[in-house]
Structure formats: structure tokens, C-alpha cells
Amino acid sequence: MYNFDFEKPSTIADAVSALSAEDAQALGGGQTLLPTMKQRLASPSKLVSLKGIAEMQGICTGDDGALCIGGATTHADVAAGAGAYPGLAALAGGIGDPAVRARGTIGGSLANNDPSACYPAGALASGATFVTNAREIAADDYFQGMFTTALDEGEILTEVRFPVPEASNYQKFEQPASRFALVGVFVAKYADGVRVAVTGASEEGVFRWTEAEAALSGNFSANAIADMTPGEDGMISDLHGTAAYRAHLVGVLTRRAVTAAG
Amino acid sequence: MPKDNGIGASPKRREDVRFLSGTGNYTDDIQVNGQAYVHFLRSDIAHANINGINLDAASAMPGVIKIFTGADFEGVGGIPCGWQVTDRHGEPMQEPAHPVLAQGKVRYVGDQIAAVVAETLEQARDAAEAIEVDLEELPAVVDMKAALADGATKVHDDLTSNLCYDWGFVEENKPAVDAAFEAAAHVTTLELRNNRLVANPMEPRVAIGDFNRATGESTLYTTSQNPHVIRLLMGAFVLGIPEHKLRVVAPDVGGGFGTKIFHYAEEAFCTFAAKALNRAVKWTSTRSEAFISDAHGRDHVTKIELALDADNNFTALRTDTYANMGAYLSTFAPSVPTWLHGTLMAGNYKTPLIYVNVKAVFTNTVPVDAYRGAGRPEATFQLERVVDKAARELGVDPIALRRQNFITEFPYATPVAVEYDTGDYHGTMDALEKMADLSGFEARRKASEAKGKLRGFGVNCYIEACGIAPSNLVGQLGARAGLYESATVRVNATGGLVVMTGSHSHGQGHETSFPQVIAEMIGIDESMVEIVHGDTANTPMGMGTYGSRSLAVGGSAMVRATEKIIAKAKKIAAHLMEAAEADIELKDGAFSVAGTDKSVAWGDVTLAAYVPHNYPLEDIEPGLEETAFYDPANFTYPSGAYACEVEVDPDTGKVTIEAFNAADDFGNIVNPMIVDGQVHGGIGQGIGQALLENAAYDENGQLLSASYMDYAMPRASDVPFYGVDHSSQTPCTHNPLGVKGCGEAGAIGSPPAVINAVVDALRSGGHDIHHIDMPVSPSRVWQAMNG
């Protein structure tokens, strides 16, 4: 680890100001950033912790019924407090281990957009709204490829608003070593259609499997996508699975998610 | 009621109190006054010429004391290899130089280019980043068969090829073996890979070199399984320090699994630099460094053939193995695929003719050496896989085929040069069958199928050679060391004992089990006995702990020394009671005269030895301290039968272990709880190898699984509750305790059972599959089903 400055502001405005310094970096729970810094693979001049900002903590229900989760809310708190959206609570409760869930935050995960992380699948499948200090961003515009999002430099993800679906489920098939998602599929059924988001599989990061969405929107059952598999083009191929295997898992897990969502 | 003291009792491990309460004293806990820190600049390229190293900028960095490169070690010996294998043609193996820091070339990702010694670790790391190295990349040699092709790039330019040796065993048997295959009614052939593993002890390696200018003595604190071996190898062969001027301390060590047997360059560096700088120098490996600098394990590619007659008797066995040595020869690397592997190919079977060929190959990868089981898991895996395949091809029950071919008469001389003293292979198989509830399997399979899962049952036997080893024998086989063990038993005036053993505990529980033996012999409480190990300054020359040898060899030395103590104490007791020495009996901590009510307590005798007012000074010396060295007459041969039940999810290929049962014959058992724990841990590692662990290199020699993000260690949820049974006991005939050793059995015996079960499951689902290479990851299983 290289030396760095550290600030822990208590308001979003102070955080934005602190992040205006050159090479400053926002710090959520540090579950990715700190190991990266220890490996000397990242060297921010300043870390700005978002954990002291009260207005970024916690879960509430918006006027439109959406579940609003503060960006600095931990996975453990979402697992325990997002009962109104059981599929999302279960996703949060399955991330990492208890220590990771006690530190890691939803904002940190979504701002990092790891291609194998769980939250991007939940947020994209929910058509969530990403609230920042400057604007609101639709989920379909937010994810822009591996480790890439619509966030500008210094922009803070303060809240994520999840429309609550009629039915939902997340199926994660763990990579044996990291236990990140080798493939993860989140299915959410809304009155106006079904959304299916896939993490872990694509070289472009989280994506919507629109073919399955179309079939499931007409008939929300595993049979509707019985023989369906996305193409293996663009799927990740590595030590833990070929592109064909990942594509196959997308089909399997989507069917399981639909069945489990009921 | 179970015993609560002595042999057969299961007292809780006394060392665990400090391990579990954070009060252990591991090497990294040691802070030497004024210590500096070293960071090694390691190659990130697998194979390259070093065309230049510019230290100017780095040397001027804050806190830098000195930066060393290979040039600083030109007058110093290389890291030695402790075993010389002679090839099929009677020629010695090719043995390349192994410099402490790279000279001219780097040969694997992780090879040390330079070592920065600085006031703080961060300063050393900063300066290492400022070193300018001009590396000219060369083609990386990774695949073993490609490495032996004509015109292949050479890892070592001064060797004739990348072949370390081509070993045939037993070479004279080859024509007869080949003839038996010609005459066979059935031949089963299997090609497989024994996957490369990273040992991953919980505690990474650490070395601290220290030098006392006043006495001229060097001290090395190190995470070692065998401090005396390190003192001998490093002192005599690398740095030229006589043993009386070199002390090696291996205090609490947090797991070894073989990878802490070897003498590593970092140890020599810290010892050398401490003297050169007159400063203690400390190195603590990071986990990332451990992946690319701890010796790896396994990595064999094998073709095995089994010949059977028309009655399904095994008539001959033939194997052809490529064994990866990595870039340099680690301390015992050449012995692993040869004498620790070929000699075990008979397994539990009376196969009369066996021929083993092993080609050891240099590649641009981390050196490979012994890892829990060392050669024996490789032997067991291929043998028990081919026997299983043969049973399927012949349509016979795999257990019946094994039983039919079991060795049943002992001693038994195998065609691969070892003589099993005892064993009862039907006995362990009987115990296994009982535990594994074979009759209930079909119902369990149906229940799994009702859930859409495939269920499989796999069984295997194993034999191992432990209690390493008769020194005269291993000397003939190329060992450059003896393999005896030592113990000094010191009785204090008030009756307590201290045992200074050459064995080394790095998790095995010696501090608990060794006192049980002495408590049994004298009839005193275990708490009166303390075990001292791990410091060459206060223990007799010993060879350390590996190869499941501690109790069989180190424990035997302790028994011999204690026998001397008791013999002398009896003389003293006879004097005190004015009786004939022959009439003295020792029982429950008291000496009595046979046929009388006269007795003196143990403590009275020990006090007399040190306060010899009334003492036979004309016959014996005062004091009560004895040393014994024990050199075993043979290996010991633990054996067993293991069974695994798996479920396979046909949709994803994921394998889950539903049940694992192990029946072992370890001979006599001192502490059943510790033995159970050793078996549990070994099975966990075996399941890790079978399902999860994979040290994989790409074609450029980059380790793809160089962190826990990609190297899958077994976790609690990956393994079931184990069934273990140690009721089948055929005591070793040639050591005084009748013990065989239990440390490696689990890791040796478990991988084939897992794979046999997976193959069984897949075949039950209609997949015509005979083998999947380890680890049987979900993707590999799915590939096999859909390939």
C-alpha cells in the first residue's frame, strides 16, 4: 500500500468537495479497493469514506412504492432490511461471507461494477434508478461494461431505488475459488413485463437477456424458455469455465430463477 | 471407560491453548533488535535473459541499506538438492545450479532477481519498484512433453536437454512385464494427470537471519519442518558456516504439508545478508509470494496399464509417467516421483510383475517437491483408478476385484523392492463396507434421482510407506542424508521430564501425544512431561517431521532413550531398597521389589540421581539424562480402504460429496483423537485436490491461479462429516511402539474414491465416461457429459 490521505465527511456536499482533489477516490466498504491498494495495484492520493454520511444509510420506501437504499448501506443491512423485496434481500444475504457483508456497501459494489458481482444483476433486472449527488440515471444507461459505469469522476452514488416486482429470484452459481458469481441470473416480474439480468458471464459485464425476457413476459414459466440459451459469443472463457459452459448456465439458472420466483 | 492417561487416551491438545488464544510464537512474531527488512524483486516473466540490472535510482531511495543481486552470490554455493537419482542407464540425473539470486537468467515467474534490504518493509518495496531490469524474454517451457521434444528451448543452457532423468523401475523386470502384457486376457489402460497443487499452509514462510559479531555465530529463525536439515544444507553447502557456528530455530510453525521441508533461497539470503550487513534481516512472505515461491506439489502425467488373466487376477502393471520438476531441483524433488512413488505401485495387490518409467522434466515453472503424501498419492491415484476402470470393463464388482487380488500373507515382498511387514486389507475393507452402508446405496441413488441428481459410489484402497526411513537403504537409493531420528530425555531432580526431540511439530500435536508414551512407560501423569523441539541449540541432531515419521521414528527414539532412563533408574532403586536390580519392577510411577512390599516412588529415585548421598557412585554416574538415535529397520506400511458418495447435478456439472468413510490400519494408536484429526485433515486436502485445487499455468508460464480468487481451497461447506474407523490394527513389527504413522493417509487415500464416485455417478446417468482429470470442477464435468 502506498501512502494516502483519508477523509470521512458527514455530508454529501463535503464528500463531493473532498473528491475534487486529484486522484481522490471514494471508499465504501473497501472490500475491493483496499485489497487492490494492498497489492499496490491502485494508488489514490486520498480516500474519501462515505460511511459517515447519515443520509446515505438505510432503507426506506418511496412515494411510488420503490425500495430506496442508501449508497452506504451494507449488504448485511440490505439482507436484513429489504424484506419488502425478498429477491433483493436474498441476493444481498448471499454476497461473500458475514465479514464481507458487514463491511461492503451497495453503492461500492454498483460503482465498482465488477463483472462477477451480484448487485449489478439485481439492479439491472429491477430497472433501478441510480441517484447521485448530481442526477438520476436509469439502470439501462448506468452499466457500461466491465468496471465501467455512467458515473462521472467524483460523482457519488447516494441512493438506489428499486421498483418492487411481483415476483423475483436470484440464482448464483459460484466460481469455486472466489465464490463470486461464475454466472448469476436475476429475474424480476413486473406488471409490464419480465426483466432478466445476467452477471458473471459476459465480457461486457452485466447484461439483459432480452430473448428470455420476451418469452417470459408472455408466459412466466421455465417451460417458456425450456431450450433457450444465449449465444456463447462474448461470453467469458477462463480457468473456471468455457464460454459455452457459461452460456449453458445462463439458461439453467434463468429457468431455476423463474421456477423459484413462482 | 476410556483411558484418561497414557497410550490410547485422547487428552485435548495442550498446544492448542496457545494456538487458539493467539499466544503462539511463530517466526513472524519474533522481533530481533535492530532488524531490517528484505523484499525480493521477483521475475514476472517465466523465462528471460537478464541483460542488465540498474540499481542507481533504487539504491538512493529512502531507507535502503543495500540491494543484492546474483553478482553478490557468485562466491557462494547454490541451493543443494538432497537426493540424487540414477537413471535407467546408470547415469546420474542432470542437476542444474540453483543460485540464491538469479544469475544471468530467470527461469520461472517468482524467481528472485534482486533483494532489497531497507529499514522498513514499505521502503524495501518502494525501492524494488525503482530497480531497472533489462529482461530479454525467451520462449517459456511449460508442457512436459513439449519440453522433451527435439529442439525445445532449454530451461538450463548448460544441460543437454530438459530431461532431469529417465528412471526405470525395476529395469530388469521390463522384459517380463512386457511379456505378461502380451499374454494378458485383458488389458486396461488409463491416461491421467495428477494436478499440480500449492500447499497453502495457513502460515506463510518467514525467515530472519541474525549474526552475533561477538561470537561469530549466525542464527536463522525459519518456518521449517526440519531445522537440523536446514542447518546442515545451508551451513555446509551454501554459506560454508560450520554447524557449531550456526543455529536454526523453527518455533511454532503454522502448517507445513511438505512445503516447509525444503531449504529455500530466502533462508540462505537472510543468513548471508545478516552477516554482510551486521544487521538482522527479516523476510515475511505474502500470500501472493507464497503462490510463486513455495515449492508446489504433484504435477504428474501418467499412462498406466493393468494386465489381467482370464480369472481377473492382476498379472502385470506398467506405467509411464512425466513428472514436473519445475525450473530447479528443490531439496527432495527427485525422490518424489521415483522412490516414493515407484515403490508403492504394488498397492494392496499381489501383482507379480511391475515396471515403472518416470521421466522428470525441467520447465519454466515453480519447483515441485513433496506435498502431503509425496509420490504415494500419485501412485495410489493411478493404480486405484485403473483397477476401477478394469472392474467396469470386465463387468465385475470393484470391491470384489480388489478383494480377489489383495495381498493376504505377510511379510510380503513386492516386485517393487519393498517388504510389507503387516496388514489386513480385508479387515479394513470389512470395516469400510460396514460404515458405508453399501446395501442402502441403491435406495439413496433412487432418492437422488428423484431430485434430478446422479449419485455415485466410489471406493479405493491405499498402501503407503511411512516412517521414513532406513538410512542404509535410502543411502543406496540416492539420499544425501540419513533418516534416523533422535531424542534426549532429561529427568529433573523432582521427577518431571523434558524430551528434546529431533522431530518437529507444525500442527501434529507432538506436545500432547509424545508425553502420553512416556506416561505409559513410567506410569506417571502426562503433565509431568514437556516436549522441546525446533531449535538446533537445544535438541539433538534430528531429521524433522514429514513422511508420517514422527511417532514411528522420533517416538521410537524417545522410547529407546526412556528405556535407558528406566534401566538406570532401576539400578538406583535397587540400591535404595538394597535389592537385586533384576527384581525391580516399575509400575504406576513406583519401583518395587518383586515379591515384597518394598517400594520407592519415581520422585525418590530421580531425586537420588541428582542428590546422590545414598547412591551407587562406584557403578553409575549421577544424573538421569539419556539420548537415543533410532534408525528404522524398514518403512511402515499403513493401509486402508476409503469410500466416497457423490451427487452430481447433471444440469451444472457440480459435484457434492454426500458421504466419505475411511477405514485405516495405523497399527497401534497413541491418541485416537489426534489420529482422527489427522485423517480428517488429510481427507479435506484430498477432496481439495479432487474437486477444487488447480495450479494452472498458461503457455507463457504465467500462473493463472495465483491467488485465492482463482485457486480454490476446500472450505467447510465443501466437505461432509467423515466416518472414520481405526479398529483394524496390525501393529508394525519392527518399531517398539508398533505404530505406522497417520499424517498422510487421508490425502493419499481420498482422491481416487472421489473420482471413482464421480465416474460411477455419470455412468449411472448414461454417460460413457471413464475418466475426468482432477479437479473435477463443474465445468469439466459438464464438458465431459456434453463433450
Image (cartoon, rainbow, N blue to C red):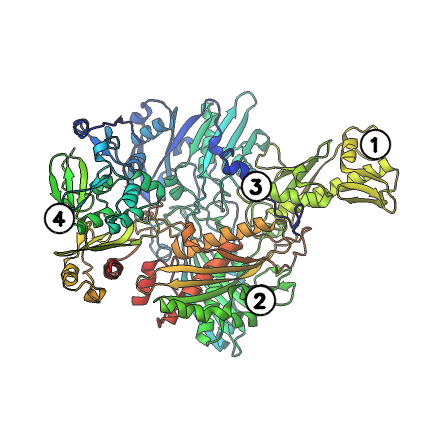
Callout 2 amino acid: Asp
Considering only order in the chain, which callout, 1 or 3, is on the residue closer to the N terminus?
3
Q: Secondary structure at mark 1?
A: loop
Callout 1 amino acid: Tyr
Marks 1/2 in contact by CB < 8 Å: the verdict is no
Callout 4 amino acid: Asp
On residue B708, which mark appears?
A: none
Marks 4/2 in contact by CB < 8 Å: the verdict is no
Q: Given the current orientation, which residue lies at the most extreme top position?
A: B214
Residue that carries the numbered disc 2 in the rendered image: B430
Is there any visible trace of residue B375 in the rendered image?
Answer: no
- On whether disc 3 and disc 2 are found on a single subunit, the reply is yes
The image shows residue B161 at horizontal and vertical percentages of 39, 52
Q: Chain of mark 1?
A: B
**Of residues B553 and B754, which is closer to you in this image?**
B754
Q: Secondary structure at mark 2?
A: helix
Q: Secondary structure at mark 4?
A: helix
User: Residue at image x 55%, y 68%?
Assistant: B353
Residue that carries the numbered disc 3 in the rendered image: B504
Residue that carries the numbered disc 1 in the rendered image: B615
The image shows residue B379 at horizontal and vertical percentages of 49, 59
